[in-house]
Image (cartoon, rainbow, N blue to C red):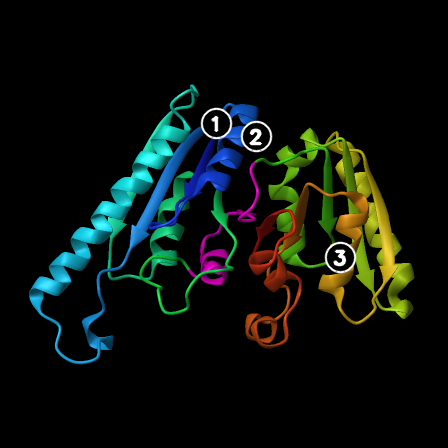
């Protein structure tokens, strides 16, 4: 199992240098082709305050076409010295942007995008809603922190929960796990479930071994904030990449109360590889 086609999503109207560097490093490592993709929505007249002329709408579309062209130029410029096969897809659409990206990901092994932080809640016309994308896409998503310039493979942490989403994420991440020098499975569980947690981890470690991945495991007691606890372990382990299932809990609950998925999508300290 390997990755043959990566898709990198570019935000329009802003720099995408970090995620393009990560995409290039991954494409080189897996000898993969790369699809660049960008999308924007035209001005939503129904939400405007007062009269909006046809000229204003036309000017808005032209501005977004220019931004998309700039994103394509940034994409092609980032790969000009690489030998990977390239493809570009873009659109201005009335549909939610996450819907378009999810549909186009049919031909990619996973999608690389940026974290959901520092984006204006009032400008959904240029930026995807990352939670929607993860829920709809049917592919893993690699979330790149804004400050990232490369992705490491040396140390990977898997946040293990015995759920469908986590099993899928670990299976999806196998090519990455095989590149790692150190893989650590971490399960955070209540004190009265520690025996079961250790049993789960032992079985997964053995399964990974059959796939050529040597992993260690950590079962640790929940302190009430599993997201913070996992982040602390990541810092202690100097993790380059976090692998996790997305939205094992109800998504509304995560949005209201926070949780591991919410933090991996909005405040990742390292690159995060998630599947739903």
Q: Position of residue 26 (x, y in %)?
A: 54, 31
Q: Give the foreground label among 1 and 2.
A: 1
Tell me which segment is drawn in magenta: 129-149
Q: Is residue 242 magenta?
A: no
- Which residue is under mark 2? 2
Q: Position of residue 12 (x, y in %)?
A: 34, 49
Q: Is residue 185 left or right of residue 118?
A: right
Residue 32, disc: 1
Q: Earlier in the sequence, mark 3 or mark 2?
A: 2
Are dots 1 and 2 in contact, CB under 8 Å?
A: yes
Query: In the rendered image of this protein, does residue 136 appear above or below residue 216?
Result: below
- Of residue 96 and residue 196, the one placed in the foreground of this image is 96
Q: Give the foreground label among 1 and 3.
A: 3
In whole angstroms, how far apart are the C-alphas of marks 1 and 3? 31 Å
Q: Is residue 227 left or right of residue 107?
A: right
In whole angstroms, how far apart are the C-alphas of marks 1 and 2? 9 Å
């Amino acid at each position: 199992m390997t990755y043959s086609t990566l898709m990198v999503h570019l935000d329009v109207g802003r720099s995408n240098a970090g995620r393009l560097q990560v995409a290039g490093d991954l494409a080189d490592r897996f000898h993969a082709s790369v699809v660049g993709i960008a999308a924007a929505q035209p001005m939503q007249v129904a939400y405007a305050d007062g009269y909006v002329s046809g000229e204003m709408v036309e000017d808005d579309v032209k501005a977004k076409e220019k931004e998309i062209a700039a994103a394509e130029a940034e994409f092609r410029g980032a790969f000009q010295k690489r030998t990977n096969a390239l493809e570009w897809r873009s659109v201005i659409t009335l549909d939610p942007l996450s819907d378009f990206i999810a549909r186009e990901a049919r031909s990619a092994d996973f999608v690389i995008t940026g974290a959901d932080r520092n984006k204006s809640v009032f400008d959904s016309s240029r930026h995807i809603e990352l939670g929607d994308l993860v829920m709809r896409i049917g592919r893993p998503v690699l979330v790149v922190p804004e400050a990232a310039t490369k992705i490491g493979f040396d140390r990977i942490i898997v946040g293990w929960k015995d759920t469908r989403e986590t099993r899928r994420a670990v299976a999806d991440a196998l090519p990455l796990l095989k590149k790692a020098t150190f893989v650590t499975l971490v399960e955070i569980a209540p004190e009265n479930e520690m025996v079961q947690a250790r049993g789960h981890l032992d079985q997964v470690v053995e399964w990974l071994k059959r796939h050529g991945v040597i992993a260690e495991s950590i079962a640790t007691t929940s302190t009430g904030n599993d997201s913070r606890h996992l982040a602390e372990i990541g810092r202690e382990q100097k993790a380059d990449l976090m692998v996790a299932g997305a939205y094992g809990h109800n998504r509304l609950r995560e949005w209201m109360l926070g949780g591991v998925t919410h933090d991996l999508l909005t405040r990742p300290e390292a690159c995060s590889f998630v599947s739903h």
